[in-house]
Image (cartoon, helix red, strand yellow):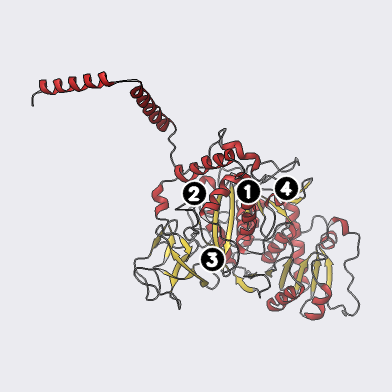
């Protein structure tokens, strides 16, 4: 066909189109152009490439009989060692030399000295105690160092070896933990607010000879009569009860227990005493940390002994578990509304201290704490909560958001931004319509803590317990309700910190959103699945008991006692 014929056909077609053109044609073309323009102008790049979420862990090339391949997160691929520690560089060491794994003493040294990076400002975090919405106390780091030294020396001088800490989240809790590390004592973390029989049982099983606790919380009379191994008791007395005599031993006890108060230990020494930390000795023997794990209320707690290596390995995994620019920093204010007697919130608190972030302590923290109440008086940027707390927050907020058509439309716009665009919802008129219905997490009326915007919310599912499971849709809603990214982890008795946890930018909601997953293994743990009576591992199905291995695991390997599987995106999930 010649060029002339083609031009003739084109001219005839164009003429036919123009002769049939009408108002409807104009409307259709206009709508198409507007739609195309809107799509181009409002196109949003996802915060992370979808391929990085499609395969979040790698499997070993071979597997053993009765076991699945071993899965590792992409940050700790096969062929490289798992994260074992903090890579602490001693003063004077070459910057090219490999650092030490470190221990809890290095965490506090970093907290009081500031960042060690050359050229970085020595910005130190602050330590705060929250006493309601009207009173927030800021503690001097040197004063806490003095408490660590004097309390540690006092316990050691009285022959103490195993120290049970039975306190709510507080400065005294964390100071006692560090005192045990600096003075070669075993720290035993008891879950707070437990029945008397449970407390005495934990003391007997752990062999504690010293207890640091608060008046009214510890069953002193019953403990002394039922547990003859108790030798020391240190009361942490609040301001309103300091005038009472807490050193008196009840009649009939025979003076077998040395009773003192935290305040007396500090006041009986010169002001300048204990202001310097003991000299660093990397070769010194450091005792373990004992944690009790309770699977269900009323059940017998499982006693787990973590080495300092287990804990610093878990800290390092949390420090590297989020993108570089989003990691904990001195600009953050960290608060745990979960009890520090559990390893997951404890490890995150220690990671915040090591990163020189400010840390706030609130005694209302617990399993069923109220998130708004726990953050009253401060405006944290990073919060650790329990599944029970977030489930309650979600249910209360969801009922308000679903009250009208306009509030549901606003929530749909924000959900679409998360799920389809892969970005946190941007500020807009419709998206911000529900802001007044969302929980007000963090309110600062005090001039002491600078207000901040919540940016990161951690929550861990304790394996094998009756804690509520947070589905993908629930997590998506919580991101909208709180304005923060949510990291959902799987924790276990013999694993310090987390076994696995969702990625920072994983906002996906698959299907109806009811599925639950815990992301890939963290960089201090590798995971495999093993045969059970009801599930056999085959080449087509890797469903079995979840087993964790690595430097963060007590004993090196720990079956979790729950049946799980690996999803197509190589994330860990319950069956």
Along the viewing direction, whichever of 239 and 110 lies nearer the viewer? 239
Identify which residue, 513 or 569, lies in the foreground. 513
Q: Is residue 496 left or right of residue 336?
A: left
Image x and y of residue 538, in percent: 36, 72
Identify residue for label 3: 552
| Residue at numbered disc 2 | 507
Density class for disc 3 (Cα within 10 Å; few <14, some 14-19, many ≥20) is many
CA distance for labels 3 and 4: 34 Å
* x then y, percent, for residue 514: 50, 56
Mark 4 or mark 2, whichever is nearer to me: 2
Above or below residue 20? Residue 217 is below
Q: Earlier in the sequence, mark 2 or mark 1?
A: 1
Give the foreground label among 3 and 4.
4
User: In the rendered structure, which disc, 3 or 2, sits on the residue that comes first in sequence?
Assistant: 2
Asked if the residue under mark 4 is in contact with the one under mark 1, i.e. CB atoms within 8 Å, the reply is no
Foreground tag (2 vs 1): 1
Q: Secondary structure at mark 2?
A: loop
Look at 62% across and 54% down and name the residue there: 390
Query: Residue 1: which numbered mark, if any?
Result: none
Q: CA distance from mark 2 to mark 1?
A: 22 Å
The answer to whether 317 appears left or right of 242 in the picture is left
Q: Position of residue 365 (x, y in %)?
A: 70, 57
């Amino acid at each position: 066909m010649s060029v002339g014929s083609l031009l003739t056909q084109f001219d005839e077609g164009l003429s036919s189109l123009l002769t049939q053109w009408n108002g409807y044609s104009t409307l259709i073309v206009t709508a198409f152009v507007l739609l195309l323009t809107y799509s181009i102008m409002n196109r949003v790049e996802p915060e992370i490439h979808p391929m990085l979420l499609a395969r979040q862990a790698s499997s070993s090339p071979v597997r053993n009989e009765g076991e699945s391949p071993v899965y590792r997160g992409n940050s700790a691929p096969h062929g490289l060692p798992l994260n074992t520690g903090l890579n602490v560089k001693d003063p004077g060491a070459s910057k090219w030399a490999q650092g030490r794994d470190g221990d809890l003493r290095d965490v506090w040294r970093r907290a009081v000295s500031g960042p060690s990076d050359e050229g970085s400002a020595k910005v130190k975090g602050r330590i705060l105690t929250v006493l309601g919405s009207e009173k927030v106390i800021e503690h001097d780091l040197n004063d806490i160092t003095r408490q660590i030294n004097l309390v540690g020396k006092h316990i050691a001088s009285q022959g103490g070896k195993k120290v049970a800490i039975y306190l709510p989240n507080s400065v005294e809790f964390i100071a006692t933990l560090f005192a045990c590390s600096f003075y070669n004592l075993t720290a035993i973390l008891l879950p707070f607010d437990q029945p008397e029989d449970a407390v005495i049982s934990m003391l007997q099983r752990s062999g504690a000879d010293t207890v640091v606790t608060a008046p009214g919380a510890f069953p002193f009379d019953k403990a002394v009569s039922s547990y003859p191994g108790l030798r020391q008791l240190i009361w942490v007395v609040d301001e309103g009860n300091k005038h009472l005599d807490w050193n008196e031993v009840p009649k009939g006890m025979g003076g077998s227990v040395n009773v003192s108060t935290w305040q007396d230990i500090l006041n009986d020494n010169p002001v300048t005493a204990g202001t310097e930390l003991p000299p660093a000795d990397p070769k010194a023997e450091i005792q373990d940390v004992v944690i009790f794990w309770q699977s269900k209320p009323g059940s017998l707690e499982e006693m787990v002994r973590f080495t300092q290596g287990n804990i610093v390995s878990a800290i390092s995994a949390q420090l590297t578990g989020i993108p570089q620019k989003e990691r904990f920093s001195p600009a953050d204010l960290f608060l745990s509304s979960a009890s520090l007697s559990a390893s997951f919130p404890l490890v995150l608190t220690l990671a915040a201290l090591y990163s020189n972030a400010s840390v706030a302590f609130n005694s209302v923290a617990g399993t069923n704490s109220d998130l708004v109440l726990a953050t009253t008086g401060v405006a944290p940027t990073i919060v650790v909560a329990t599944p029970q707390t977030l489930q309650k927050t979600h249910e209360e907020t969801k009922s308000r958001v679903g009250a009208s058509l306009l509030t549901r439309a606003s929530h749909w716009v924000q959900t679409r931004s998360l799920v389809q665009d892969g970005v946190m919802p941007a500020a807009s008129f419709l998206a911000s319509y529900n802001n007044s219905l969302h929980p007000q997490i963090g309110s600062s009326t005090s001039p002491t803590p600078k207000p901040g915007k919540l940016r990161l919310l951690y929550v861990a599912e304790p394996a094998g317990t009756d804690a509520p499971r947070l589905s993908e849709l629930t997590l998506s809603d919580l991101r909208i309700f709180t304005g923060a990214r949510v990291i959902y982890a799987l924790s276990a008795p013999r694993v310090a910190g987390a076994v696995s946890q969702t990625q920072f930018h994983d906002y996906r909601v698959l299907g109806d959103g009811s599925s639950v997953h815990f992301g890939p293994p963290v960089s201090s743990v590798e995971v495999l699945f093993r045969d059970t009576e009801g599930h056999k591992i085959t080449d087509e199905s890797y469903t079995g008991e979840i087993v964790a291995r690595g430097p963060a695991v007590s004993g090196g390997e720990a079956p979790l006692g729950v049946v799980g599987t690996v999803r197509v995106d190589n994330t860990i999930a319950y069956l």
